[in-house]
Image (tube, grey):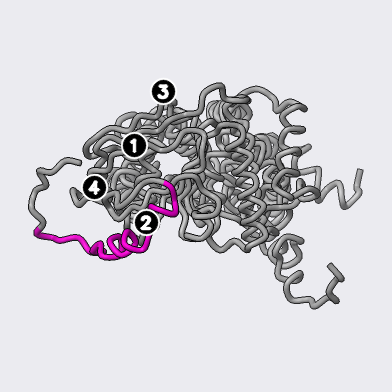
Amino acid sequence: MLDPFYSLLIEPFAAFGFMRRAMVAALALTISGTPLGVLLMLRRMGLMGDTLSHAVLPGVATGFIIGGLSLFWMSLGGMVAGIAVVLLAGALARGTALREDMTLAALFVIALAIGVSLVARVGSPADLLHVLFGSLLAVDDHSLLLIAGVSSVTVLALMVGWRAFALDTFDPGFLAAQSRSAGFWYYAILTLVVLNLVAAYQAVGTMMAVGMMIVPAAAARFWSQELAGVTTAAAVIGALAAYGGLLISFHLDLPSGPSVILGAGAVFLVSAVVGPVGGLARRMIRRPHLTG
Amino acid sequence: MNATRPVAVRLSDVTLAYDRHPAVHHVSGAFAPGALNAVVGPNGAGKTTLLRAIAGELALQEGRIDRDGLSRHDIAYLPQQATLDRSFPINVLDVVVQGAYRRIGLFTCVRRETIAEAERAIDAVGLSGFEDRPLSTLSAGQFQRTLFARVLLQDARLILLDEPFNAIDARTTADLMELMRRWRGEHRTVIAVLHDLDLVRSGFDEALLLARSAVAWGPPVEALAAQNQLRARAMSESWDPDADLCHGAA
């Protein structure tokens, strides 16, 4: 088979195991991460992903200090630190007069400062780069299992709780009046976000992990007026971005994590222009009006 | 559900405060069961605060609210509309079905009867044909009709409405008032915060004129008499930073 399409689009995955692993990891993260991104977007908490991705960093660094370059310790540290920030953010947002956007902005910078300090204290700049940018092409068995596990747990949780997740996002006051469980869902969403970020950080890095959640969701918003449509579109866009990004990374010898995000970014920009729901072209092109 | 006995809501010496400054001060009395009750008063009189307390959202500083044994989850409470994100990707039918949350719960499928019930509610508020319309395409009046349809599905014996007719035109107001009269016919207790005094006089059974304390409470024409309104208007809007401790009671 010397078909150029085959060598361009399929051969990298057929020939190289690390590409197949990277694809599986990226798809699993996409399927569980994009619905979370949609929920964050609709809660106007798009930056919460950023905050939590940086909140994970000091935990990962602490895990590194305790256990060295161990997946278990670094992931555990990341989860503990991330969930601690979730609880802190929730308590500050609900218990004080400060608005949520400022709470998140403050926590984000504080967490980043602690994380960078810790990494600088104990590791070389190369380690820091690894944590920040990850390497999708070096996903080993253990991290693949972690990603698959987190992805499965997330998808199950979303399936079971989707109605509450959606209702708590649309009208939290209504859910609170209807059900005792109302306070729980905010923390549940953010805890799932933390789990996904921790699973993703060594594949695509903490900075890019959040991009795989948020960018497909932002792009999907231009394609549907229904929650189910937006969520499906986000997953499809994320999967396409994972595939396209890995190919670009392979052929042009670019880092894999950023390539996947750039793939999603390209879909986002195209969607913003041609998307049928509030896209630029729809608004720019004047069309004759209807009778009613 | 047709309530066998209408719900009575009684206030005993209710005081609600923000940072110890009372927004509702020593109010006692009872709302008429199975009737349309209006709460009126100037801005800052504590109307919304009182409604939220009845809904169980606010802790009381002092006193007691007797909800006739209803838990807060059995109450339909429609807050002022500004708080919802109307660009949320959802259609009218899905919003209305939310009203059945208590019956459906988290994990079971929405049954065909519930969908049919939601469609009847959409019809009752005059929105037939709007089932699949995205929320973002609705006018303020259509949006309020949608929220009323959701209240219909809640099938609650106590219904709290906070300024339901703000920025709503005369026709929509008339339609929704008709719906509220139907609720009265079904022995549901309605408590609504309103600013349109003519509407209160013509359409409501009881009115509470609130200006932090209860200025008057009774049949609307008497409660809204000129001298009562003058007294309500005399209420100072600002609180006194050096106010003394209150030792009074109703």
Q: Which mark is residue A84?
A: 1
Q: Is residue A120 magenta?
A: no
- Report helix, strand or loop for mark 1: helix
Q: CA distance from mark 4 to mark 1?
A: 40 Å
Please name the residue shown 15% across and 61% down the image. Answer: B240
Residue at left 61%, top 47%?
B147
Q: Nearer the viewer, mark 2 or mark 3?
A: 3
At 75% from the left and 71% from the top, the residue drawn is A281
Kindly identify the amino acid type of the residue bearing the numbered disc 1.
Answer: Ala
Three-letter residue code for mark 4: His
- Residue at mark 3: chain: B
Could you tell me which quadrant the C terminus of chain B lies in?
top left
Distance between the alpha carbons at the discs numbered 1 and 2: 16 Å
Return the residue at label 3: B69
Is residue B236 highlighted in magenta?
Answer: yes
Q: Is residue A264 visible?
A: no
Q: Are marks 4 and 2 in contact (CB under 8 Å)?
A: no
Tell me what residue is drawn at x 53 percent, y 57 percent. B199
Q: The residue marked by circle 4 belongs to what chain? A: B
Q: Which mark is residue B25?
A: 4
> Which range is magenta?
B219-242
Q: Amino acid at mark 2?
A: Ala
Judge the density around disc 4: few (<14), some (14-19), many (≥20) Cα neighbours within 10 Å: many
1 and 2 marks in contact (CB < 8 Å): no
**Left or right: A264 as drawn, with respect to A134:** right
Q: Are marks 2 and 3 on the same chain?
A: no
Q: Secondary structure at mark 3?
A: loop
Q: Nearer the viewer, mark 4 or mark 1?
A: 4
Instruction: For label 2, count other residues whose C-alpha is less than 10 Å away and answer few (under 14), some (14-19) or many (20+).
Output: some
